[in-house]
Amino acid sequence: MDAFGLDLIRRIREHPLYQLTVTRLREFYREPEAVFWVYVFPLLMTVGLGIAFRTEPVTTLVVDVVRGGNIQGVTERLRTAHEQSDQPYLRAFRFRIVENDLNIALTRLRVGKTDLVIERQAAPELDQNRTIFHFDPTRKDSLLARVVAQVALYGDHTHWIGNTSDVTQSGKGGRYIDFLIPGLVGMNLLAGGLWGIGYVAVELRVRKLLKRLLATPMRKWQFLLALLLSRFIFTVTEVVLLLLFAWLFFDVSIFGSYLAVAVLLVLGGWSFSGLGLLVASRARTLEAISGLINLVTLPMWLLSGVFFSYERFPEVLHPLIRLLPLTSFNDALRGVMLEGQCLLNLSWEIGNLILWGLVSFVLALRWFRWQ
Amino acid sequence: MAEAAYVIECRGLRKVYPGNPPVEAVCGIDFLVRRGTCVGLLGPNGAGKTTTLEILEGLLKPTDGEVRVLGGTWDSDELRLRRRIGVSLQETRLADRLTPRETLHLFRSFYGCGPSVEELLLLVGLEDKADAYIRNLSGGQKQRLAIACALVGEPELIFLDEPTTGLDPQSRRQVWSIIRNLREQGRTVVLSTHYMEEAEQLCDYVAIIDRGVVIAEGPPVSLVAELGGDHVIEIAIEQGNPDPAQIESLPGVRDVGQFRGLLQLTVTDPQLALEALLHYMRQNGVVAATLRARHASLEDVFLRLTGRTLEEETPNL
Ligand SMILES: Nc1ncnc2c1ncn2[C@@H]1O[C@H](COP(=O)(O)OP(=O)(O)OP(=O)(O)O)[C@@H](O)[C@H]1O
Ligand SMILES: [Mg+2]
């Protein structure tokens, strides 16, 4: 290269604009967390949401058939509906059929777990059974299931219509907002445990305040308990406000017992606090703890059914997703709030929460770095 | 338990920080502190002062060596010792949005005895700022609050790690007077500093630490006296090549050291020595850029022992 070229390169390298830009780039690439959040995280998010909202070649409709009466014929026709060649558009649908008692089936319809409930009733005046469709006209999937089921069962033979009747219910408890609120409560509780306990503990460590407190006769257990207690007070206020707000403005109500909701909130808050303490037990810097907290919370917000049901993910993943503590909490809270279940029916979820809490606390106390 | 004459006894103290390579921050320190005295650890950055103090405070485990504080050991009497000592760490950022009063109430709850919050505020002169947020305090006020926190349990033994570093001269004097008060009350104070003036002003006994070992110890006066003269003449040479051996033989001159173009003379009789020195310089064509005569200090002791000044970073071992 000639002298002029070399000189030009030198002058560019010494230019403030060049130096400032290069400095920013260096700072960025030397912080692995930043690289992760900027490059890797959006890809992971895309994969996760892509799987959840993938378009399927067939539309699955969930139908609850009420036990008792002559239902064999009905289930059989629904199951094979897509093979009926005289109705080509039926091929685009599959029915997932569940047999249930009437009241369970109706609860499932109300909370949106099923799209349609089909009941067969003896009708002596017709000399045969009458088919009753229970559906929710405010939900598209429910309407669709109603219409498609009629075609699947009776084809175009309109003379059968006299044998069917409709019962509609538009469910409080089945709206998106009803689904969302318990998820938001779970998300808040998790964030509260991780940021309110984990981040705060590391901040105290970084400021050497933890070490300073350790130099007094303060008891460690008192310190940790105070951390949990203060967090608990914030969380209770926060969640009660959220539930109150949802009730006042969106008419979201609690179908189960208030006591059961309270028990779940305490249990969830405690379990997530344990997780927060565990995540904080070794971290030495605020960058490290923020990274760890995001690493724990974001996948759960995606997978555990906060904003949309984890049923959207492939079924093989469900057992894994159910192992996550936030999934257990959300499922249990929805069970109590929307379906009015009692805690005994939710023993798996509650057991899983307790286990997470216990394991986290034991490990956190063993590993906790005081300075 | 009979009160021993020494509130701190440590022998063969060693601390190696694991790492690659491991850092030997303290390499064999023996250290005794007599009850009711103010003892200073004096040394440059990285000398091992904080490490030593934190071991004595029971916050760090020594790699090796034996530590007895107030007649007990950290392994067996932790809670009893914690109640009887007060600590101010080198860098603690107290909660920004608390007030000094709230902070002192918090610390006081751990001890269940000792002076009231009002008394403490008065003691460190923070009564005006008692209800201001800590983040709005000046550096000196924060430091005085840190000292107040160390005094909460009415401790008989107080550790202060660099209590005046980064403070302006006026704040420094305020802190000094608080520390002098403590000693007058008969309490034992162990402090670290890299200001030789501070050590001379406050301490009955000084241990000069460099690279993890004590290189000299004693009352400040006797350490300075060991230089052999109580005055120092410093000359920065601009021109000429003075011969240290010849200068040392001048009347009134005790000793000559040479550090990077700086000639340092320890002298017993400054007037006699100056006259002889100026005469020598004129005759040998030596021109001085600066020439200064002053009282000898601990700074000179350190310089003489290590060839470095206290302001310099400890070079890597
Ligand atoms: N946690 C640590 N891990 C590794 N090395 C450390 C650690 N703490 C201190 N050191 C090293 O040990 C040596 C002594 O440090 P120390 O903090 O005791 O010095 P100091 O005399 O208090 O210095 P200063 O005047 O700057 O406060 C230094 O070289 C320092 O780099
Ligand atoms: Mg230090």
Image (cartoon, coloured by chain):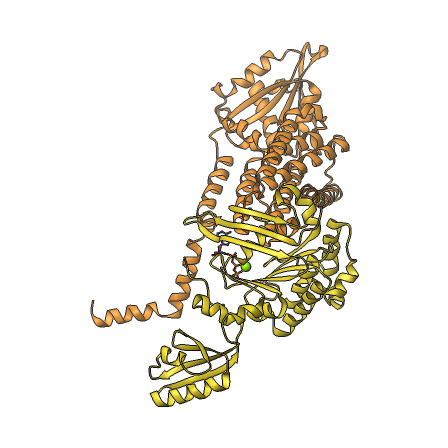
- The spot of residue B125 in percent (x, y) is 73, 68
Q: Is residue A24 above or below residue A45?
A: below
Q: Is residue A35 above or below residue B276?
A: above
Q: How many marks?
A: 0
- The spot of residue A106 in percent (x, y) is 69, 24
Q: Is residue A155 visible?
A: no
Instruction: Tell me the yellow chain.
Output: B
Between A196 and B160, the one nearer to me in the picture: B160
Q: Is residue A80 visible?
A: yes
Query: At 66% from the left edge and 43% from the top edge, which residue is drawn?
Result: B77
Q: Is residue A274 above or below residue B12?
A: above
- The spot of residue B248 in percent (x, y) is 40, 78
From the image, which quarter does the N terminus of chain A lie in?
Answer: bottom left
Between B9 and B139, the one nearer to me in the picture: B9
Instruction: Tell me the orange chain.
Output: A
Query: At 46% from the left edge and 86% from the top edge, which residue is drawn?
Result: B274
Between B165 and A232, the one nearer to me in the picture: B165
User: Is residue A351 left or right of A50 when viewed as pictured?
Assistant: right
User: Is residue A100 left or right of A82 when viewed as pictured?
Assistant: right
Quadrant in the picture for residue A237: top right
- The spot of residue B81 in percent (x, y) is 68, 48
Between B219 and B203, the one nearer to me in the picture: B219
- Residue at far left of view: A2
